[in-house]
Image (cartoon, rainbow, N blue to C red):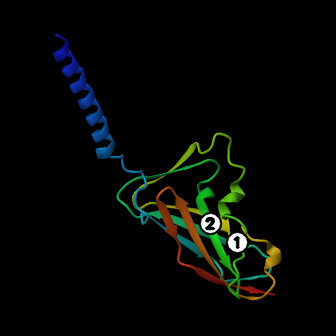
């Protein structure tokens, strides 16, 4: 009587522990919605290549879905919350003060509740001010400046080719 019950309980416990251990080591996580770093491309388009010192530089940033999958990007106020400009002066000094996406602050209470859906091959674009994350007083010298845009969201990291523009008097 007692021994078979003891062996049954012990066997059940061992199988349960073995099953938990195996399930932890063989568990496969579902893939992320945006699983590839090269799933999007980023491009900066400017209408002119020079501007007087202190003037805004309007541009368009384009994000293109280069996959065969739908890409979903969660955001609170604007999809470009995830955009960063790296601005370098003519002498190579970085002038960026904060991520460009911070201009859409404050983040909505409760966080991201909107979804941008970018279909395969589709492009999402928006007009930006390339100097929007810099202090205009830092634009002291004339010369050629460089800007790169990075769009970073979950596993997406799309970097634009750098563009150059001239600051004139």
The secondary structure type at the circle numbered 2 is: strand
Front-lying residue, 98 or 131:
98
Q: Is residue 4 left or right of residue 150?
A: left
| Residue occupying image coordinates x 39% and y 58% | 120
The residue wearing badge 1 is 96
The secondary structure type at the circle numbered 1 is: loop
- Please say if 90 is above or below 29: below
- Please say if 68 is above or below 150: above
Where does the image place residue 164, in percent across and percent down from the top left?
62, 83
Dot 1 crowding, Cα within 10 Å, few <14, some 14–19, many 20+: many
Quarter placement of the C terminus = bottom right
Front-lying residue, 20 or 152:
20
**Real-space CA distance between mark 1 and mark 2, rounded to the nearest whole angstrom:** 9 Å
Pointer 1 with pointer 2, Cβ within 8 A: yes
Where does the image place residue 151, in percent across and percent down from the top left?
55, 64
Where does the image place residue 168, in percent across and percent down from the top left?
77, 87
- Which quarter of the figure has residue 86? bottom right
Front-lying residue, 22 or 50:
22
Query: Residue furthest toward the top?
Result: 1
Where does the image place residue 145, in percent across and percent down from the top left?
68, 83
| Residue occupying image coordinates x 66% and y 66% | 128
The residue wearing badge 2 is 84
Residue 53 marker:
none
- Which quarter of the figure has residue 121? bottom left
| Residue occupying image coordinates x 40% and y 53% | 70
Quarter placement of the N terminus = top left
């Amino acid at each position: 009587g007692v021994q078979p019950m003891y062996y049954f309980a012990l066997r059940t416990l061992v199988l349960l522990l073995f099953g938990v251990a195996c399930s932890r080591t063989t568990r496969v996580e579902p893939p992320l919605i945006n699983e590839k770093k090269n799933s999007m491309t980023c491009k900066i388009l400017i209408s002119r290549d020079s501007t007087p010192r202190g003037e805004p530089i309007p541009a368009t940033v384009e994000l293109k879905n280069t996959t065969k999958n739908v890409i979903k990007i969660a955001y609170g106020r604007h999809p470009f919350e995830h955009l960063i400009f790296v601005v370098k002066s003519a002498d190579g000094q970085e002038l960026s003060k904060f991520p460009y996406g911070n201009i859409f602050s404050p983040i909505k209470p409760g966080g991201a509740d909107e979804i941008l859906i970018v279909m395969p091959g589709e492009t999402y674009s928006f007009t930006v001010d390339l100097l929007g994350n810099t202090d205009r007083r830092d634009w002291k010298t004339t010369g050629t400046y460089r800007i790169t845009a990075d769009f970073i969201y979950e596993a997406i990291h799309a970097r634009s080719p750098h563009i150059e523009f001239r600051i004139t008097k």
